Amino acid sequence: MPNILICDDEPDIVSALQIYLQAEGYTTLTARTGREALRLAADNDIHLILLDIMMPEMDGITALAKLRETCNVPVILLTAKSEDTDKVLGLNIGADDYITKPFNPVEVLARVKSQLRRYLTLGSRPAREDNPTHYAVGSLELDDKGKLVLLDGEPVSLTPTEFEILKLLMQHAGEVLSPRDIYRRVWNGEPYGAESTVAVHIRHLREKIEINPAEPRLLKVVWAQGYKLDGEKRP
């Protein structure tokens, strides 16, 4: 079963999360500071991290930034309702999702399973003619089986969530997808707050695949409707 690292300085929250996750068969490791979380992530085979923002010694945002220098493991932020600015900052740095405290156990498990499914399962099924694993649009190429993205022949490093958003847009190149559609298909959940969450990931993705993110040539916004990927599909 997947190993999940829980990092929070509140023992009651850690204990509750352990109960929810272990009941589903997951193995859990725990940390009370961002620094300890980085050490555990480096020393263990971690498949997902639940990371609190406000912690002593090293906060979650700093820990996330350091983690993203070397690792693309899914990260779900644990945030308070008053930490909206930190949520956006965390998504910009590379968080895949966030859960607001106090949280619902059903929501926690749904979001964990969604992230793990993308990280561990997608791309592992055999390729079929109606389920291709390679997409090419304009100067972009995406290999779903190898989890590789190339821009003008050069590799692009994406988080699992960014990868899935780009794959969805490449599958529907030229079509406009609303933030709610993107959220439903990528996060596999009800699109509450979808606009802001998707917008942050789109902006971060654009910074990685556009020469000038302020004047995108590939990933474009269609005002009041959604997003689309421009470019000719190639075999």
Image (cartoon, rainbow, N blue to C red):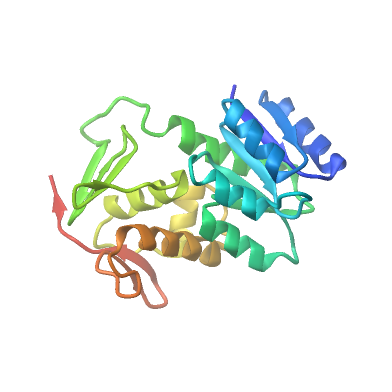
Note whether 84 is above or below 122 in the view shown.
below
Q: Position of residue 174 (x, y in %)?
A: 24, 62
Seen in the image, is 6 located left or right of residue 75? right
- Please name the residue shown 62% across and 47% down the image: 76
Image quadrant holding the N terminus, namely: top right
User: Is residue 210 at least partly visible in the picture?
Assistant: yes
Badge count: 0
User: Is residue 192 at least partly visible in the picture?
Assistant: no
- Please name the residue shown 52% across and 66% down the image: 195
Note whether 34 is above or below 199 in the view shown.
above
Residue 202 placement: quadrant:
bottom left
Seen in the image, is 118 located left or right of residue 109? left
Question: Which residue appears farthest toward the right when viewing the image?
Answer: 12
Q: Nearer the viewer, residue 31 or 169?
A: 31
Note whether 206 is above or below 137 in the view shown.
below
Q: Position of residue 191 (x, y in %)?
A: 55, 58
- Please name the residue shown 67% across and 66% down the image: 84
- Please name the residue shown 28% across and 50% down the image: 171
Residue 32 placement: quadrant:
top right
Seen in the image, is 108 located left or right of residue 12? left
